[in-house]
Image (cartoon, rainbow, N blue to C red):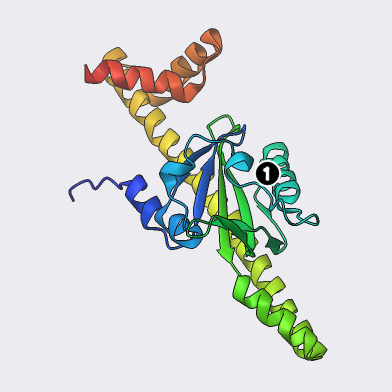
């Protein structure tokens, strides 16, 4: 079967859910098409800018908590290296057509992207807009339908919990994928040493492990070096 390479940039841009990609110091380095469509803000206008400079609180809303709550969530992700699902959050945005802030509500999830050492190298900020749902909820409250409102709120809370569980599962799948790739690479290096040195698999692996410990370099990196040398 012909090997197929996935274009992850195209996949990210085609995702139907709005995403921002952030550095650990909260600079915007990625924006997908769905995010542009949801906010009306072009990626070229925010790429390379600090998150809260590009998306500040509404200065006309003294009760605005968007920046404060989002910053706290992102800091939890950096600290715990785990996804963080936020409660529904009011976070007004500037309407490019009028250049004025408009009321917007979102359901955000923030997810760490980890390197092989388990360190956070990027943050994924994913949102689902729920502005119309919140407006309808407010209208129901004005019309005194508390039972319906409580049921709707509970349903939405359960949906958020399910999404958080899905994000955890996705992270586990990614960690498994990285582990399997490392295992295949080490296996390749072991096979090459067996052929080159005329030793069995156990001895070849022991040689790799000894080199890793002696140089204080990860076993996967040592294996990669052996494979690269063989390919030259």
In the rendered view, would you say 114 is above or below 73? Answer: above
Please name whichever residue, 132 or 205, is drawn nearer the observer in this view of the structure. 132
Residue extending farthest to the front is 98
Image quadrant where one finds the C terminus: top left
Spot occupied by residue 77 in the image (x, y as percentages of width and height): 68, 43
Answer with left or right where residue 135 lies relative to residue 169.
Answer: right
Residue at 47% across, 39% down:
47
Residue at 68% across, 66% down:
161
In the rendered view, would you say 140 is above or below 181? Answer: below
Spot occupied by residue 187 in the image (x, y as percentages of width and height): 38, 31
Spot occupied by residue 104 in the image (x, y as percentages of width and height): 62, 64
In the rendered view, would you say 33 is above or below 197? Answer: below
Q: Secondary structure at mark 1?
A: helix
Residue at 37% across, 24% down:
190
Answer with left or right where residue 165 lies relative to residue 18.
Answer: right
The answer to whether residue 39 of the structure is visible from this angle is: yes
- How packed mark 1 is, by other alpha carbons closer than 10 Å (few <14, some 14-19, many 20 or more), is many
In the rendered view, would you say 225 is above or below 175? Answer: above
- Which residue is label 1 attached to? 74
Answer with left or right where residue 149 lies relative to residue 172.
Answer: right
Residue at 34% across, 18% down:
226
The answer to whether residue 194 of the structure is visible from this angle is: no
Residue extending farthest to the top is 214
Please name whichever residue, 20 or 116, is drawn nearer the observer in this view of the structure. 20
Please name whichever residue, 193 or 114, is drawn nearer the observer in this view of the structure. 114
């Amino acid at each position: 079967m012909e090997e197929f390479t996935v274009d992850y940039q195209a996949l990210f841009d085609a995702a139907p859910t709005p995403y921002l990609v952030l550095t650990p110091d909260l600079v915007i380095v990625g924006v997908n098409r769905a995010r542009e469509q949801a906010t009306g803000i072009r990626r070229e206008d925010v790429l390379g800018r600090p998150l809260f400079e590009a998306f500040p609180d509404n200065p006309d809303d003294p009760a605005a908590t968007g920046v404060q709550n989002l910053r706290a969530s992102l800091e939890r992700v950096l600290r715990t290296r785990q996804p963080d699902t936020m409660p529904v959050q009011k976070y007004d945005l500037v309407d490019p057509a009028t250049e004025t802030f408009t009321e917007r509500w979102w359901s955000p999830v923030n997810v760490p992207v980890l390197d092989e050492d388990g360190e956070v190298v990027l943050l994924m900020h994913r949102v689902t807009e729920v502005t119309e749902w919140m407006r309808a909820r407010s209208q129901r409250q004005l019309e005194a339908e508390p039972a319906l409102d409580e049921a709707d709120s509970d349903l939405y809370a359960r949906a958020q919990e399910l999404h958080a569980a899905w994000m955890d599962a996705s992270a586990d799948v990614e960690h498994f994928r990285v582990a399997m790739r490392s295992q295949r690479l080490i296996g390749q290096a072991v096979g090459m040493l067996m052929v080159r040195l005329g030793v069995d698999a156990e001895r070849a692996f022991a040689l790799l492990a000894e080199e890793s410990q002696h140089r204080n370099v990860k076993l996967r990196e040592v294996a990669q070096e052996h494979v690269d040398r063989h390919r030259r």
